């Protein structure tokens, strides 16, 4: 035993070592999970399709406790966290019975999962005789309650959990090792089920749904949020005298709804759609278009879908490549509630694999395939560049990203963004009115920003290159409490003479725009310590000041997450400094001093090899001022 090597794993993010071991791991193709005998009820289907093994565990749980309704929801669930949350709601749950079957369940789930694919089987077998351990810092049942970075992980006697998942993996490894290879390949029925049964047996089906970041093919959705706006040229058939030649879109739903408003000559709604900042708002506005007439809309629907999809995919290199990579697959929007753009079926519905059984017209899937055809025919140059005459105007940096929109063509694919994808980091740390020693004591809606500092870090040289600070005059509680003055070091006169929020914000924006131009930066990303500044405080300030949350402030890097990825530990600013052997400088809770310290943490992390990936960025999508 002393000789046995230990293999700790944790996390399901694609690209992580052994992310496949996680029950949240996303399989490119769903696999069949056969429900084990001990969990069957009279109503339980023999098998279900899973794209992540968390679904198998939770479905098994619902069946074991005879909760048919939750079982149905779990089978339909689209995401591991959704399945997990549903699993917690299973009725008639009894701890004893669950514990009795827990290890058996873990084994069934893991074995069937790894037996469903050659690649997974080989991955598991390649671990040899290593002692596999789930280094889940907060899970003492499936994991051992220790992070990968905890030295105790290397000593099983010091583990603080049962390692149910690790043990199930080792048991499955045993069984797979014994099974003749032929038994370990995927079941042919499962494979066949995934082929189209429309007579064109060779064409594979690729169902997609949802715009949630990081989901495979989220880019296909019209709600998908582009990092930077692209230009949509209004098609001839939808134009009125008053219709502008083009509009800027950060999600393609806007292009669809703009066409609709223009086609039906509703200039007022068109204007609101053009100004709207979230796909939901846009869609709601589209429903209010006046003079609407179903026949005319239906007549142009497919053409509209094609125009919108084609222009969108032609505006970004990575989107174009993504679409072309689907080759000749039959693209189908698995939208359970949409029988026009989608096919009225969920991804998990076995009928999705047979076009004859679809319940809808698949307008979006068809438009994507048509756009794919046209893009394929284009000459292979820096093709993703917009067609002549359609180059986006230089977007105001405030609406999205600082990049020139023509930069859109060379945008980096969202899944693997190297740190150098940004020219600079803009560290931001608000200070706000407060009292007593507890954040909760002041009505959170009355909290207002009183200091707005920014620190600019060059992403190449990793040096701080500039800084900005303005104080801000609060209106709900214009007089600072002694506590607040002491905490932040900000004096009454400093805020009394300061601009109100809208002016302070405009000053910061103007400063940043000027720095970007002068220093020749195109792409930046805000960096904050935690999500409070841009997720909570800014939106709240915007409500108080009756303005929208500016686009540019809807995406940021949470430095705590970056640190956690580096060290396996979640720490506050002082903890991170300590962990990186950096001395705290200045006055803690002075916004500018905090920014400088956060910048030092960020620099140290990048110097130590941390890579800032798109899926690590926090994004506030849609909605504003709430
Ligand atoms: P910080 O993230 O440390 O810069 O804090 C931002 C804001 O959160 C401060 O300006 C205060 O409004 C509030 N805050 C931070 N720490 C405390 C605390 N210990 N008690 C009350 N409010 C706090
Ligand atoms: Mg601060």
Image: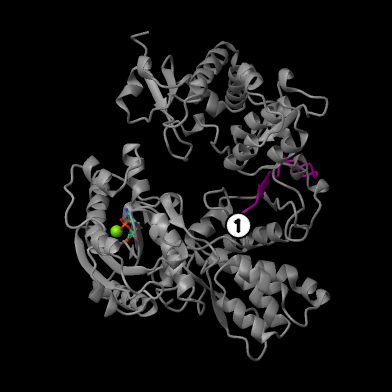
Place of residue 286 in the rendered image (x, y in percent of width and height, measured from the top left): 69, 73
Place of residue 38 in the rendered image (x, y in percent of width and height, measured from the top left): 72, 18
Above or below: residue 214 compared with residue 243: above
Q: Residue at x 55, y 64 (%)?
A: 622
The image's colour scheme reads one colour
- Is 170 left or right of 460, judged from the image as shown? right
- Is 384 left or right of 407, judged from the image as shown? right
Q: Residue furthest bottom?
A: 241
Residue 323, magenta (yes or no): no
Place of residue 459 in the rendered image (x, y in percent of width and height, measured from the top left): 26, 58
Circle 1 sits in a helix, a strand or a loop, which is it? helix
Q: Would residue 182 be visible to someone looking at this image?
A: no
Split into quadrants, the picture shows ligand 1 in the one at bottom left
Magenta extent: 194-211
Classified by dominant secondary structure, the portion drawn in magenta counts as loop
Q: Would residue 2 be visible to someone looking at this image?
A: yes
Above or below: residue 220 compared with residue 98: below
Q: Residue at x 30, y 72 (%)?
A: 512
What residue did someone put label 1 on? Answer: 220
Disc 1 CB within 8 Å of nearest ligand 1 atom = no
């Amino acid at each position: 035993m002393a000789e046995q090597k230990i293999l700790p794993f944790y996390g399901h993010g694609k690209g992580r070592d052994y992310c496949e071991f996680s029950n949240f791991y996303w399989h490119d193709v769903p696999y069949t999970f056969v429900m084990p005998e001990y969990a069957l009820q009279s109503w339980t289907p023999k098998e279900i399709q899973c794209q992540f093994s968390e679904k198998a565990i939770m479905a098994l749980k619902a069946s074991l406790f005879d909760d048919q309704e939750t079982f149905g929801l779990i089978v339909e669930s689209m995401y591991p966290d959704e399945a997990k949350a549903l699993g917690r709601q299973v009725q008639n749950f009894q701890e004893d019975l669950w514990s009795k079957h827990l290890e058996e369940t873990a084994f069934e789930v893991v074995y069937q999962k790894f037996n469903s694919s050659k690649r997974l089987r080989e991955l598991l077998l390649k671990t040899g005789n290593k002692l596999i351990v789930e280094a889940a810092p907060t899970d003492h049942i499936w994991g051992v309650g220790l992070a990968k970075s905890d030295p105790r992980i290397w000593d099983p006697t010091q583990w603080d959990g049962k390692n149910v998942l690790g043990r199930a993996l080792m048991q499955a490894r045993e069984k797979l090792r014994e099974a003749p290879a032929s038994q370990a390949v995927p079941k042919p029925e499962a494979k066949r089920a995934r082929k189209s049964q429309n007579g064109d047996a060779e064409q594979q089906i690729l169902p997609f749904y949802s715009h949630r970041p990081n989901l495979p093919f989220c880019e296909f959705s019209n709600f998908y949020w582009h990092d930077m706006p692209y230009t949509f040229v209004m098609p001839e058939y939808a134009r009125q005298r008053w219709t502008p030649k083009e509009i800027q879109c950060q999600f393609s739903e806007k292009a669809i709804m703009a066409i609709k408003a223009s086609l039906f000559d509703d200039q007022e709604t068109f204007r609101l759609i053009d100004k709207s900042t979230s796909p939901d708002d846009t869609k709601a506005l589209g429903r209010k278009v006046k003079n609407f007439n179903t026949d005319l809309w239906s007549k142009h629907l497919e053409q509209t879908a094609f125009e919108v999809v084609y222009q969108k995919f032609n505006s970004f290199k990575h989107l174009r490549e993504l679409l072309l990579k689907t080759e000749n697959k039959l693209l189908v929007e698995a939208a359970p509630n949409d029988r026009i753009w989608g096919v009225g079926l969920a991804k998990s519905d076995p009928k999705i694999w047979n076009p004859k059984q679809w319940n809808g017209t698949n307008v979006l899937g068809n438009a994507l395939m048509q756009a794919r055809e046209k893009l394929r025919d284009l000459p292979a140059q820096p093709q993703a560049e917009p067609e002549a005459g359609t180059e986006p105007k230089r977007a105001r940096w405030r609406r999205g990203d600082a990049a020139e929109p023509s930069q859109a063509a060379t945008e980096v694919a969202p899944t693997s963004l190297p740190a150098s994808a940004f020219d600079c980091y803009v560290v931001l740390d608000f200070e706000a009115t407060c009292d007593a020693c507890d954040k909760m004591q002041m009505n959170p809606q009355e909290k207002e920003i009183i200091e707005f500092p920014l620190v600019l870090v060059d992403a190449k040289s990793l040096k701080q290159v500039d800084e900005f600070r303005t104080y801000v005059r609060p209106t709900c509680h214009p007089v600072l409490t002694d506590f607040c003055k002491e905490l932040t070091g900000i004096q009454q006169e400093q805020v009394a003479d300061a601009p109100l929020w809208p002016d302070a914000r405009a000053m910061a924006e103007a400063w940043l725009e000027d720095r970007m131009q002068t220093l020749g930066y195109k792409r930046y990303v805000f960096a904050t310590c935690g999500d409070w500044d841009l997720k909570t405080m800014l939106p709240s300030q915007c409500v108080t000041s009756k303005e929208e949350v500016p686009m540019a402030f809807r995406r940021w890097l949470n430095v705590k997450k970056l640190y956690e990825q580096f060290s396996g530990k979640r720490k506050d600013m002082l903890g991170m400094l300590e962990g990186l052997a950096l001395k705290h400088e200045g006055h803690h809770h002075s916004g500018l001093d905090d920014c400088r310290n956060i910048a030092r943490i960020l620099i140290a992390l990048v110097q130590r090899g941390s890579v800032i990936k798109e899926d690590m960025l926090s994004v506030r999508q849609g909605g504003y001022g709430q």
